[in-house]
Amino acid sequence: MGKFILGKKLGMTTIFNEKSEAQNVTLVECASKVSIVRNQERDGYCAVQIEMAKTKNKMAKKEFRMATTEAKVGDEITVEVFEIGDEVHVTGLGKAKGYQGVVKRHGFAGGNASHGNKHAERAPGAIGSGYPEHVLKGKRMAGRMGGKRVTSKNIKIVFIDKEKNLMALKGAVPGIPGAVIEIYTVK
């Protein structure tokens, strides 16, 4: 595992580069500290657990495995571990969209809006067959959509503010504003 940090997604904005080209970026506030250090002799593997404030009373924690650890409990991890131009993976909880039908959830076409069809424009159509005489497991149907762990890979860092611990990532990243996300490099 390479460099890593926990961050809080602040939202999206537009910044301009040296050529006056607009770039859509996601601003992330990054400030975390080491809470537990695991080593091979005591725990059977090497890892570092880092934490950051999720809300006023709650902490978000994530453990990153690595070959060796030089970190100590209480060490601060700031945006200084990354540089502009680094490509990182960003993992977070995607937006939850609630209970959705098959047209939105799976991209079904729906039925005809005319020619004798009534009240079935967004219905899934037939869901079973003659022989097993039951609905097969895994059939794409209406249900809860989103709210799952998502990873966006190879996101470029375009701006870093070391005083405010802010980082701007090119494009969109998973989650809602205020959500805790993991930012890391894979080597």
Image (tube, helix red, strand yellow):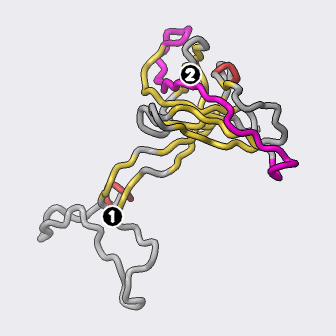
Task: Give the Cα separation between the discs numbered 1 and 2.
Answer: 38 Å
Seen at 42% across and 32% down, the residue is 177
Is residue 154 something one can see in this rendering? no
Q: Height in image: 89 above or below 122? A: above
Give the foreground label among 1 and 2.
2
- Label ID, residue 183: none
User: Which residue is the site of mark 1?
Assistant: 142
Badge 2: few (under 14), some or many (20 or more) residues near its Cα, within 10 Å?
A: many
Across and down, in percent, residue 17 comes to 53, 12
- In the displayed structure, does residue 133 sit left or right of residue 119? right
- The answer to if 43 sits in the magenta stretch is yes
Q: Height in image: 51 above or below 125? A: above
Region in magenta: 16-45
- The answer to if 159 sits in the magenta stretch is no
Seen at 54% across and 9% down, the residue is 19
Q: Height in image: 53 above or below 95? A: above
Viewer-proximal residue among 79 and 97: 79
User: Which residue is the site of mark 2?
Assistant: 167
Q: In the structure shown, which secondary structural element does the residue marked by tag 2 occupy?
A: strand
Q: In the structure shown, which secondary structural element does the residue marked by tag 1 occupy?
A: loop
Viewer-proximal residue among 27 and 128: 27
User: Residue 116's image quarter?
Assistant: bottom left
Name the kind of residue labelled 1 in the image: Ala
User: Residue 64's image quarter?
Assistant: top right
Name the kind of residue labelled 2 in the image: Met
Seen at 61% across and 39% down, the residue is 153
